[in-house]
Amino acid sequence: MFWDEKFSADHYIYGTDPNDFLAAQVGAIPKGRVLCIGDGEGRNGVFLATQGYQVTSVDSSRVGLGKAQKLAAEKGVTLETVVADLNDFDMGHAAWDGVVSIYCHLPEPLRQKVHGNIVRALNPGGVLLLEAYTPKQLEYNMGGPPVVELMYTADILRHDLASLEFEHLQELDREVIEGTHHFGMGAVVQAIAQKP
């Protein structure tokens, strides 16, 4: 499997520090239960656990989540990990105070399904925090999906998450320094959206 192979490196390919946007905006997520989708090697889930959240990290890679558990142990926190394909994973209904999606790029039909599931799965007052690459990322060639069909834009997020209230929605270029696999200028879309 592609991600198992990628994550089988000895080091953490995206580093062990959390995503910059998440670290800066973590206070926007209500304290409680948080779901991290596509959490890979666990840097974001583990960070949230160190901030006092009860975190469940979901990823299709058993290898990645194995490294996530190791990182959680090193940081002295508890992290629940679930190996699952997001196409099959049941997020539940009004089950989470926060959902975090960092560079979780999905093809359109699955993206729409997952975003719909997120809206249902958030508690009233719950918050989605998301960062993803936009099509402009292909010009930078420093990470992210190799095709425009897997990229996100502010308009896509507005459409998919229409029933959420956006507190922050912005497309911007920023330096992304994350491990060995995201390093340089990136074109991203960032969103913080709350369920009414």
Image: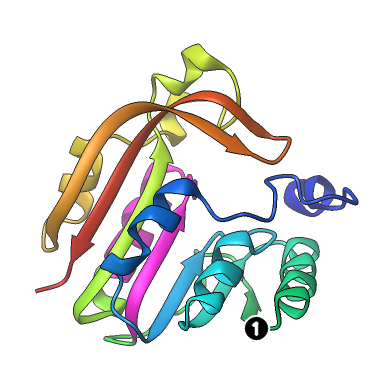
Range of magenta residues = 96-118
Picture residue at 80% right of the left edge, 54% below the top? 4
Please identify the quarter of the rendering in which residue 63 is found: bottom right
Q: Is residue 39 magenta?
A: no
Picture residue at 45% right of the left edge, 35% below the top? 150
Picture residue at 54% right of the left edge, 78% below the top? 49
Picture residue at 37% right of the left edge, 69% below the top? 99
From the viewer's perspective, is 3 left or right of 143?
Answer: right
From the viewer's perspective, is 10 left or right of 1?
Answer: right
Please identify the quarter of the rendering in which residue 28 is found: bottom left
Quarter placement of the C terminus = bottom left
| Residue extending farthest top | 139
Answer above or below: position of 40 versus 124: above
Answer above or below: position of 155 versus 4: above
User: Which residue is labeled 1 in the image?
Assistant: 77
Please identify the quarter of the rendering in which residue 58 is found: bottom right
Answer above or below: position of 74 versus 128: below
From the viewer's perspective, is 44 left or right of 12?
Answer: left
* Percent of width and height locating residue 67: 78, 66
* Percent of width and height locating residue 162: 12, 55
